[in-house]
Image: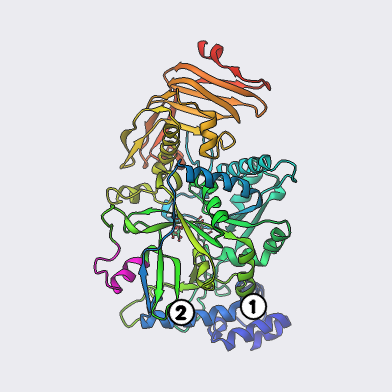
Amino acid sequence: QKNLRILSPDQIKLAKMLTSEGQSHLFAHWAEPGVDDEGKRSFFDQVARLDRSYPGGLVSYIRNARKLLADSKEGKNPFDGFTPSVPLGEVLTFGDDKFVGFEEAGIREVRNAAFVLVAGGLGERLGYKGIKLALPAESTTGTCFLQHYIENILALQNASNSILQGQHEAQIPLVIMTSDDTHTPTVDLLESNSYFGMKPTQVKLLKQEKVACLDDNDARLAVDPCNRYKIQTKPHGHGDVHALLYSSGLLDAWHDEGRKWVLFFQDTNGLLFKAIPASLGVSATKGYHVNSLAVPRKAKEAIGGITKLTHADGRTMVINVEYNQLDPLLRATGHPDGDVNCETGYSPFPGNINQLILELNSYIEELTKTRGAIKEFVNPKYKDSSKSSFKSSTRLECMMQDYPKTLPPSARVGFTVMDTWLAYAPVKNNPEDAAKVPKGNPYHSATSGEMAIYRANSLILRKAGFEIANPTLEVFNGQEVEVWPRITWSPKWALTFADVRRKASCNCSVTQRSTLVIKGKNVYLDGLSLDGTLIIKSIDDAEVKVGGSVQNKGWTLKRIDHKDTSVPEEVRIRGFEIEKVEQLEINYTEPEQMSENDEAIEN
Ligand code: UGB
């Protein structure tokens, strides 16, 4: 009460709102007026921020929290009344006619898309101090995830524009959701690399705010243990992206520009863009309002399962059931073994890789109703079975893939299953945890993420007719991985299987110890026999044919111990570094037509 006189009318309003919502304890230890007044004002700045950034404000947050905490205490099952079953979706096989057709459709559509990258997570599981977007996706070229994503979007933009020549040159926007933990380093990474070739106006950053922590079942907000004028906060989850997009006004702007699709993706999947043309093609062809990308899932793998839920009252929905909920849900509905593999060696539920394609019109329609609020959950760690107090404060959380939960039954919600080798290799686990992953389950580490890129490129070239040697099995950081030839190409060389087939003829071979880097648009491989390292660079205007026999000592993988702190962290976490012993580098800098590389190779 005594402090009221130092507050502005807006601050008094916030104080009254808090007290009427059972939050008087927040003011219990405040000093007399005149003492710590700056701290008190900054308290209200924070409260105003928390109020603004939550759909419906702090009152809604507190009330939602009370309800969810009561349900949790009661042990209420969020899936009460629902029976899970395996849904039907579009299952694609890389390289067949259907796949190629979807890729072609996707490339036509992509100029009407906007990309949204959720990158607010710090990646505690990976144990890497920097932002994950700055990590190299592979160490042959050292390309970091953000550069890899941006170069892919630019290549998609160019490919789509060149099909529809005569129409205006579309620019594909990229939104990056950051958080307090990742915002500044993300800006620095973009600015110090000239946005990796994107126009700065094409990229928008939206920062998610954390939400207030909760101390007890009455949803009393937690005071920061280090500062009595601050509410303790924690991340709310990737579901925030919907509310942020809604309040940013970007969706309407995109609609006015004639855009049709919003593609959401995560921070560390070096394979993802290999799956984007075909999955967007599926959305466009099938008219899906929601399309989730999925891969075959190993039981208990830390990715959600796409599940059909049928309620006793007849309602059905196809939705992600998060990995920690799938097992209890199955056990509670007549599957005593829970989340287990079936005869295929995989869980019957396709694994959600959190790549969502939403149709813009229906997305805007839905968000106009919900303001982007996503169904939340709470996961308190109780002190004992009475569930009356928590071990530490908790908070509400939400996930972006829960967006379909509020959609009407008429919504067209589908999913597209692709081969894991093609679509999914995230970098989430630190070396120690990855080494403990049960045999046969994916490591999801920096080691496996990098090796998956080489494997995918090798398999794609094999499918195009290349003779690619079999991989060797090697152990890095306690993880046994397949080591394929280290093949990488820039997205402007190939985005689809049709591109690869056009530029790589079937009379080529690559040995297992080889490295092949293609950095050029119109590079045609013909009669190439590679045993060593070959780097091909060319300007976009050059059209070059590369063939003949290339043999040299090449580049080798040198084992690194992840505990060796003399080595940079991004190298340590993958367990090897590349020793560049000998290579042939050919560089085409003139806009030549079909020049051959024979001379360079003889040298
Ligand atoms: N992220 C944010 O932007 N903000 C946040 O507050 C939190 C995260 P994790 P998770 O594909 O492998 C998801 O931590 O949440 C970003 C799906 O829920 O890597 O454990 C963060 O930067 C799961 O169903 O993953 O699991 C990152 O880009 C499954 O699909 C992204 O959100 C799994 O991912 C994911 O955060 C998967």
Residue 181 point in image, percent of width and height: 55, 57
Residue 234 point in image, percent of width and height: 51, 67
Q: Disc 1 residue type?
A: Val
In the image, what residue occupies the spot 40% across and 63% down?
A: 87
Residue 282 left/right relative to 577: right
Q: Kindly tell me whether mark 2's CB lies below 8 Å from ligand 1.
A: no
Q: Disc 2 residue type?
A: Leu
Q: Which residue is mark 2?
A: 68
Tag of residue 35: 1
Residue 165 occupies quadrant? top right
Which segment is the magenta one?
Answer: 325-339
Residue at disc 1, secondary structure: loop
* Quadrant holding the N terminus: bottom right
* Dot 2 crowding, Cα within 10 Å, few <14, some 14–19, many 20+: many
* Dot 1 crowding, Cα within 10 Å, few <14, some 14–19, many 20+: few
Residue 582 shows in the view = no
Tag of residue 95: none
Number of disc labels: 2
Q: For marks 2 and 1, give the CA distance.
A: 38 Å
